[in-house]
Image: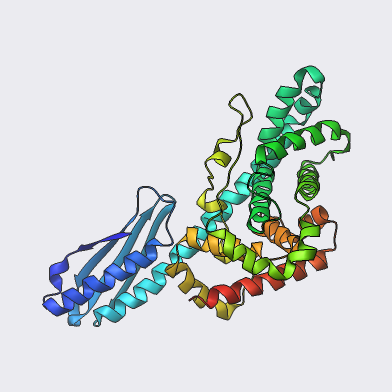
Amino acid sequence: MKYQLHNPDIVENRKDKARLHARLDDMSARLGTLLQDDSPEPVLHVYLDQIEGGEYLVYFIIRLDSGVVFSKERSSEILAMLDKLFERTKYKLKRKIRNQRQAYLQKKKEKEKSELKEHRQELEELRKPETRQSFNELVNILLGDVTRYMRQRLRSARMTTAIGQEDISLNDLLGELYLMIYERMDEMPADERQSRLWMYQLADELIDKHTGEGGFEEQKLNHLPDIVEDNYKDMQEDFTVDADQELTLVEELENHLEPKDQYNLYDLLYEEDEETMLDEIALQYNREEINSIIEKELAKLPVFKRTIMDLYLLSQMNIHEIAQIKGVSKEKVDEVITEVSQELRTRLISMA
């Protein structure tokens, strides 16, 4: 993020002005790490005024896609005042970004449930041999985040070498999932929320069959951290797509993931006294880097724990929903989320 200092001549001393610009350079760059998905890139506007008694009045203003962040402070010590403004602006930015992300994810989740409810009857009507292609196309739309969950499971399986880069593509799995839904649609719950959970269960069943991660882990579990470290940097997704295939997911082929859909630092469970350290991490590393760190650490875990965290962090499922998908108790899910969040926090804080 760039900054624009208004009324800079109020600071007359050259050394003080140089220190002021140096501090603003650092602050704007660090705040910019929190704002990767706003376009065009926001500008930190700094308004500087001198008031009675030799004090300064400083305003920070950042205009975002979602609104304006405004902070002000007055003091005779301008650099100390900038530090206070930075902390206040950081807090407001973080809160606005979290609220914006939660609203986006909740809206998307509600939209997917609404679409499933709206098109359920249509899906039933298309469940005929002569309309299979249309059935598949509609299922492709209704899967929503189930597709992203499957994509992440495949990525993790490749990181651990449970499967090779060429073993199976996402599109191959989706084709099988369409068939499973077609053949087993009589089992689909009437309630749209339960229907979505049922689709996740089918996705897990399908991926477990193809990756064999359970058996792989029995042999390699103690070596997973080293395997993931060796493979992560060089790993590239490779989805084999027939030129005539109509059900191509463009966002998957481009390895596209919206910033709001990535792993997020503040979705982890954390103690109040750890928030300052997490803030420091958020300012040191951009969202892509944090996403990569969390993704890599999760890939080192057993598939049961890893997939629970994917459902919790990426699919924004609650404990009750995850327990249903995994067929375990809510207490077990809560135990895994608490344990893994602690491990991830410890790893991230060690990097600050």
Of residue 272 and residue 264, the one placed in the foreground of this image is 264
Judge from the rendering whether residue 230 lies leftward or rightward of residue 30; answer left or right.
right
- Is residue 349 among the parts visible in the rendering? yes
Residue at 34% from the left image edge and 77% from the top image edge: 83
How far from the left and from the top, in percent, is residue 147?
Answer: 67, 43
Image quadrant for the N terminus?
Answer: bottom left
Of residue 268 and residue 176, the one placed in the foreground of this image is 176
Residue found at the very far top of the displayed protein: 130
Judge from the rendering whether residue 55 lies leftward or rightward of residue 176; answer left or right.
left
Give residue 116's quadrant in the image.
top right
The colour scheme used here is rainbow
How far from the left and from the top, in percent, is residue 186?
Answer: 88, 34
Residue found at the very far right of the displayed protein: 186
- In the rendered image, the vertical position of residue 157 relative to residue 26, given as above or below: above
How far from the left and from the top, in percent, is residue 91?
Answer: 45, 69
- In the rendered image, the vertical position of residue 301 relative to residue 236, given as above or below: below
- Is residue 51 among the parts visible in the rendering? no
Of residue 151 and residue 18, the one placed in the foreground of this image is 151
Residue at 72% from the left image edge and 23% from the top image edge: 133
Judge from the rendering whether residue 118 lies leftward or rightward of residue 23; answer left or right.
right
How far from the left and from the top, in percent, is residue 218?
Answer: 80, 64
Q: How many marks?
A: 0
Of residue 279 and residue 249, the one placed in the foreground of this image is 249
Residue at 54% from the left image edge and 48% from the top image edge: 257
Give residue 321's quadrant in the image.
bottom right
